[in-house]
Image (cartoon, grey):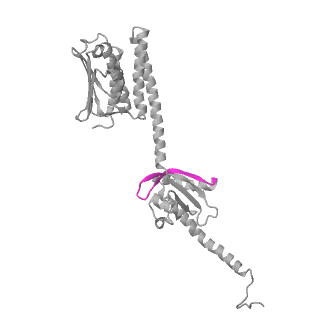
Amino acid sequence: MGISQIGPQREPNESSASGSSAQPATKQREAPERLHRILDSIKEYAIITLDRDGCIASWNRGAERLLGYSEDEVLGRSGDIFFTPEDRKSGAPERERRLANMEGRATNERWHVRKDGSRFWGSGLMLPVSDGEPDAYLKIFRDNTEVRRAAERQALLIDELNHRVKNTLAIVQSMAMQTLRSCPSSADAREALEARLVALAKAHDILTSGQWRGGDLLELVSGALEAYSNERMPRFNVHGPPVRLRPKALLALSMAVHELATNAVKYGALSNESGRVEISWDLGESTPQRFRFEWKERGGPPVQSPRKRGFGSRLVEEGLGQDIAAEVHLSFAGEGLECTIEAPAKEITDTES
């Protein structure tokens, strides 16, 4: 015995057909909202669409965060608003859209302007949209300012390094010629030239460790005098405030300290066991501010002014004068050689105190 059915009968496939037609319609309604949510969640990138006239058609949260405008403030306005005045004047926005139409894409690597007037380096691209209504162009970019500035610093560093290498080669050439000319024998010349090249190399070690931005004066002096130091019997009294040297000042003072120490070993306070050297420096309070460096030898053999100035003396006096506008005074006093170096502080350091 069968069971009677109550109510109207339906074809077996009627329900499933109705459900399947309703499901795509729902998905179609949800798709734009879902896409909008996805684009708004991408906060690191500005994602903007423009119409055929270059006016803003849509603006995601990333664009709001990066550029400072809300979507309501910019819809319908020209997409030129975040270009710099100079780029707008040169027609950069129009060229970018034209290139996107011609080649299918246009890279966007330039400075941009936020609502508050601050600038950042935008990095991205523009693409044409196929249907073109109302969105004719899609523009995507991010803030790449730090990468840009790092590249600029790297380029400046390379230029500076090239300049320094050329200067160093010129110094070595001059040093070799003068050393060979002033030394009585080839053995003396080789010894003097090797010592000067080692001093120059130590100065370059300090520069390279500081990425050619200069170095510490105390580190320079300590390194130059290391070979002559004696822990059991200290021979140097070194004191002075912290001074960060410019690259040119570091090289010039390094060579000067080396020449003074070499002279002290041969003829002055470091030629015997009882000799001592006092080294000091200061940044005076005068205006404009001046730097003063003093080298005083005591306890060595009696000294007297040489009949003929050697290359070492000329390197100290003339080299410092040319490189850092220094005035150098050499005094061959009975107590020992004294050398005073005075120069404008701006030639010595970036951080005048």
Image quarter (top left, top right, bottom left or bottom right) of the N terminus:
bottom right
In depth, the one of 190 and 9 nearer the eye is: 9
Please tell me whether residue 39 belongs to the stretch shown in magenta. Answer: no
Magenta residue span: 103-121
Q: From where the camera sits, is residue 256 visible?
A: no
Please, is residue 60 above or below residue 351 in the view?
A: below
Q: Residue at x 33, y 24 (%)?
A: 320
Q: Does 348 sit left or right of 285 as displayed?
A: right
Tell me: residue 28, above or below residue 332.
Answer: below
Q: Nearer the viewer, residue 192 or 165?
A: 192
* Position above or below: 301 against 349: above
Residue at 65% x, 77% y is 22
Q: Quadrant of the C terminus?
A: top left
- 255 horizontally vs 27: left or right: left
Residue shown at the point (48%, 35%) measured from the top left = 158
Q: For residue 209, what is the image quadrant? A: top left
Whether residue 292 sits left or right of residue 48 in the image: it is: left
Query: Residue 11, image x and y in percent?
Result: 75, 83
Name the one closer to the observer, 34 or 17: 17
